[in-house]
C-alpha cells in the first residue's frame, strides 16, 4: 500500500503540540474523519529511528490520494517523533535515507536514556503530574482531547534480535491469534525469522506464540527493579503510552512493534531462559562495543581501523543489518493487523 507517492508533499500541515526538554518542537497530525480512532507514536526510545521514519512516510500517504480509504475508515492521530532531542543525540549514526544502518557507527554513537527516564515509560500519572517530561505531557494532552481510542501502536526497535518481534495487549490475544498467525507467515515467507524468547513474565513479558509476546507494563517494571534491590529506578517509572491511552477510556487494542536494527541468527532456537545463542551474542557485542569505544578515545584513524575490523568480524559471525524497507513493511503489517482487529481494516 505504501507506494512512491509517500515521498510527495504532505497535504496536511503539522500541529506543534509542545516542545522537548531542549526546546525542540514536537509535531503531531490528525488526519481523516472515520469512525475508528487510531493513535500511532514513534521515537519513544532515542536509539530506535525506523518507527519515526515510517510514520513520517505514513502521514504523507494518509494525507494523499492513496490514503482516502484509510481516512474514511479511521481518524488518525499520529506523533511521528515524540523525542526530537533523542533524534539529535543519535544523529551521528542515523544517516537520513539509509537503507540499513552501520553496526560500528551504531556502537560508537548510540545514545539511550536510562530506565525510568525513557519517554515510553514517562507518561503522566494524571492531570496534576507536572514532573513528567514535557514530551510526555504534550503527547498525553493530544490524546486526552481525542480519546477514547480503538487502537494505539507504539513503534519501537531493538538493537539486535533474531528478527521481527510483536507485542500485544494480553487481554486481546484470543481475538488476535488467527491474524497473528497470518502475520507470522508473512514475515517468514519474506525470509525473516521471528524473534522468540521466554521471559516468564519478567517486566510484563509473557510469551504468547512464536514471535508474539504481551507488551510490558509499568507496574511489572517497578516490581522487577524492586526485586533486584533498585527502588530508586523503580520509583521513576510512570505509565507507558499504552497504559496512558487505555486510562483515557474504552478498551483500546495496544500494540508495540519491535524491529531489530541488526539480526543475530540462532536466537530463539533454544528458548531458555537463558537462551544460549542470545548469551553468546551479548558477550560478543559487549566485546565489540568496548573495542569501538576505546578506539574512539585514540583518534579517528584508530577508530576507523577498529570499526573496519569489527564490521568484518560481525559479518563473519553472521550479524547483518535488517533492511529499513523490511522493518517498515512489517511495522505496517502489524498496524494493518490491528486495524482489522478493531474493524478499521
Image (spheres, rainbow, N blue to C red):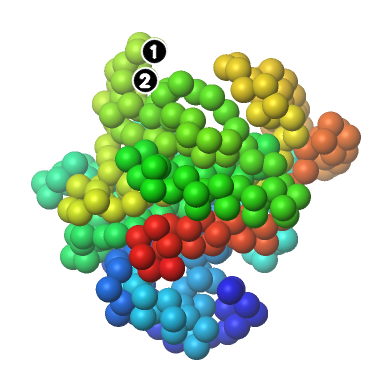
Locate residue 292: give its quadrant. top right
Residue 28, given in percent of the width and then of the height, sits at 36, 68
Tell which of 80 and 171 is nearer to you: 171
> For mark 1, what is the residue?
228
Left or right of residue 115: residue 191: right
Q: Is residue 294 above or below residue 339?
A: above
Q: Position of residue 320 (x, y in %)?
A: 77, 43
Q: What residue sits 34% from the left and 73% below the top?
A: 74
Res 314 label: none
Q: Is residue 290 visible?
A: no
Packing grade of label 2 (10 A; few <14, some 14-19, many >=20) is some
Query: Which residue reaches farthest left?
Result: 128
The location of residue 217, given as percent across then percent down, is 34, 34
The residue shown at (62%, 77%) is: 3
Q: Is residue 179 left or right of residue 320?
A: left
How far is disc 1 from disc 2 in space, using C-alphas? Answer: 6 Å
Across and down, in percent, residue 260 comes to 63, 44
Q: Which residue is mark 2?
A: 224
Q: Is any part of residue 255 visible from this angle?
A: yes
Which residue is depicted at the point 43% across and 48% down? 176
Q: Quadrant of the N terminus?
A: bottom right
Whether label 1 touches label 2, CB < 8 Å: yes
**Residue drawn at 50 percent across, 88 percent down:** 65
Q: Quadrant of residue 33?
A: bottom left
Instruction: Name the side, left or right, on which 330 lies relative to 100.
Output: left
Q: Nearer the viewer, residue 118 or 145?
A: 145
Q: Disc 1 on helix, strand or loop?
A: loop
- Crowding around mark 1 (Cα neighbors within 10 Å: few <14, some 14 to 19, many 20+) is few
Amino acid at each position: 500500500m505504501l507506494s512512491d507517492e509517500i515521498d510527495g508533499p504532505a497535504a496536511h500541515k503539522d500541529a506543534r503540540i509542545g516542545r522537548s526538554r531542549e526546546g525542540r518542537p514536537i509535531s503531531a497530525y490528525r488526519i481523516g474523519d472515520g469512525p475508528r480512532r487510531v493513535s500511532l507514536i514513534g521515537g519513544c526510545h532515542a536509539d530506535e529511528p525506523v518507527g519515526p521514519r515510517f510514520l513520517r512516510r505514513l502521514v504523507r500517504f494518509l494525507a494523499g490520494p492513496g490514503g482516502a480509504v484509510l481516512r474514511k475508515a479511521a481518524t488518525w492521530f499520529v506523533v511521528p517523533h515524540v523525542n526530537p532531542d533523542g533524534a539529535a543525540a543519535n544523529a551521528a549514526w542515523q544517516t537520513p535515507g539509509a537503507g540499513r544502518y552501520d553496526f560500528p557507527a551504531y556502537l560508537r554513537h548510540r545514545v539511550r536514556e536510562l530506565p525510568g527516564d525513557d519517554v515510553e515509560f514517562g507518561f503522566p500519572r494524571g492531570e496534576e503530574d507536572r514532573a513528567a517530561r514535557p514530551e510526555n505531557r504534550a503527547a498525553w494532552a493530544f490524546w486526552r482531547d481525542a480519546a477514547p481510542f480503538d487502537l494505539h501502536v507504539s513503534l519501537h526497535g531493538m538493537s539486535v534480535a533474531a528478527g521481527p518481534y510483536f507485542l500485544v495487549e494480553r487481554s486481546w490475544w484470543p481475538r488476535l491469534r488467527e491474524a497473528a498467525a497470518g502475520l507470522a507467515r508473512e514475515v517468514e515467507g519474506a525470509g525473516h525469522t521471528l524473534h522468540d524468547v521466554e521471559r516468564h513474565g519478567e517486566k510484563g513479558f509473557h510469551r504468547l506464540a512464536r514471535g508474539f509476546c504481551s507488551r510490558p507494563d509499568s507496574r511489572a517494571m517497578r516490581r522487577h527493579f524492586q526485586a533486584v534491590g533498585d527502588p530508586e529506578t523503580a520509583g521513576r517509572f510512570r505509565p507507558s503510552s499504552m497504559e496512558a491511552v487505555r486510562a483515557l477510556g474504552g478498551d483500546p487494542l495496544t500494540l508495540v512493534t519491535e524491529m531489530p536494527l541488526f539480526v543475530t541468527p540462532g536466537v530463539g532456537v533454544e528458548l531458555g531462559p537463558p537462551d544460549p545463542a542470545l548469551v553468546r551474542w551479548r558477550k560478543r557485542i559487549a566485546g565489540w562495543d568496548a573495542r569501538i569505544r576505546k578506539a574512539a578515545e585514540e583518534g579517528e584513524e584508530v577508530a576507523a581501523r577498529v570499526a573496519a575490523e569489527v564490521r568484518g568480524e560481525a559479518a563473519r559471525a553472521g550479524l547483518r543489518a535488517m533492511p529499513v524497507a523490511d522493518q517498515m513493511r512489517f511495522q505496517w503489517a502489524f498496524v494493518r493487523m490491528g486495524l482489522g482487529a478493531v474493524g478499521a481494516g
